[in-house]
Amino acid sequence: MIKIVLDAMGGDNAPIETVAGAIKAISDNQDIHVVLSGKTDIIQNELAKYKYNEEQISILDATDVITNDESPTMAIKTKKDSSLVKAFDLALSDENVVGLISAGSTGAVLTGGFLKFGRMKGIFRPALCPVMPTITGGTVSICDCGANMDCKPEYLEQFAVMGSAYHKVLGKENPRVALLNVGTEDHKGDTRAKETFDLLKNNKNINFVGNMEARDTLNGEYDVIVTDGFAGNVLLKSMEGTLKSFLKVLKSEIKASKSSKFGYLFMRKTFNNIKQKFDYNLAGGAVLLGCKKLLVKSHGSSTADSFAVCIEQIYNMHKGDLIGKITDALANNGVVENE
């Protein structure tokens, strides 16, 4: 079995949704073993609600929890008995653990990835890479979306290489890579954007399709959007906020009149399809590309379905040898040593 450790106490809905997600994941895939890191008695109480193959679930006892209010670096270094630190330590000590998932403090998860897992050989900066659904039924990833606020052009080039390798594991043969910019013309942007454009254009190991604008994020024309963590985070949250607002307004308008309510009866399936199509929780979590082990940061508000998707995400990345593919891509790119 492929072993994956899940921070059972991380996230807004833990441990109810984390445990339920683990149960769903192992029910769908008998080749997965999930280690639930957290308070044993609480996790056992949740597990008691389900019938499941006990060989596919185990508990790693951890009596403490890292909160969003704590200093990420201090928490990772000092809260040795927290569910997140215990999860990282197990992933490091047990070679059978292929990856880790947490919906806890983003800062703590990223810090743990940097300090505990460390960078792969050749990686300048690991990049946080979430996946979002597009209007064509595919997916697009934003690389980076928050791990690196200030980036050099060569960092962004590596993000493109890693993001491309990631999408190949997802099943895309020749991922389309674009650079987030203020216009699509080749000469657009500040000095860094222009330097990055030249690097990406001359990189023979990626399918660079040029600059793109934020409004085209979900149109299905791109697979990997390359940007720094600041702009990427703003882009990601803008997209998520817009989708939430649209669905909220749609619901409000349906309830506004009897004719709208009546019309909804005939359009219910269509509306539900739209809602499901743009449910970013079902696309999986954000992968921290460039670490020595697989690491997924799930949404803080993740449901059981989302955690199950994240577990399957780790499983598929391992099966697809994502770390090996990134290593090969870096070698082809002429990068062999860390900065």
Image (spheres, grey):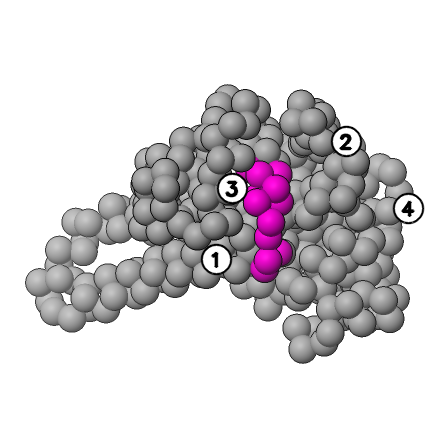
Instruction: Check the image and name the residue furthest to the bottom.
Output: 69
Distance CA(mark 3)–CA(mark 4): 38 Å
Do the numbered discs 4 and 2 sit on residues whose CB atoms are within 8 Å? Answer: no
Write the residue at 68% across / 47% down.
126
* Front residue (pair 87, 215): 215
**Residue under label 1:** 231
**Whether label 1 touches label 4, CB < 8 Å:** no
Q: Nearer the viewer, residue 287 or 64?
A: 287
Q: Residues within 10 Å of mark 3 (few under 14, many from 20)?
A: many
What is the C-alpha distance between the residues marked 1 and 4? 36 Å
Choose mark 2 or mark 3, whichever is in front.
Answer: 3
3D distance between C-alphas at marks 4 and 2: 26 Å
Magenta-highlighted residues: 148-160
Q: Position of residue 253 (x, y in %)?
A: 18, 66
Judge depth for marks 3 and 1 and give the one in front: 3
Determine the CA span between mark 3 and mark 1.
Answer: 15 Å
Q: CA distance from mark 1 to mark 2?
A: 28 Å
Q: Nearer the viewer, mark 1 or mark 4?
A: 1
Element type at mark 1: helix
Q: Residue farthest to the left? A: 259
Give the numbered dot on residue 196: 3
Left or right of 271, for residue 192: right
Residue drawn 33% across the image and 41% down it: 184
> At numbered mark 3, what does the secondary structure look like: helix, strand or loop?
helix
Q: Earlier in the sequence, mark 3 or mark 1?
A: 3
The earlier-in-sequence mark between 4 and 2 is: 4
Disc marking residue 336: 2
Q: Residue at x 43, y 56 (%)?
A: 235
* 161 on left or right of 246: right
Amino acid type, callout 2: Val
Q: Nearer the viewer, residue 270 or 10?
A: 10
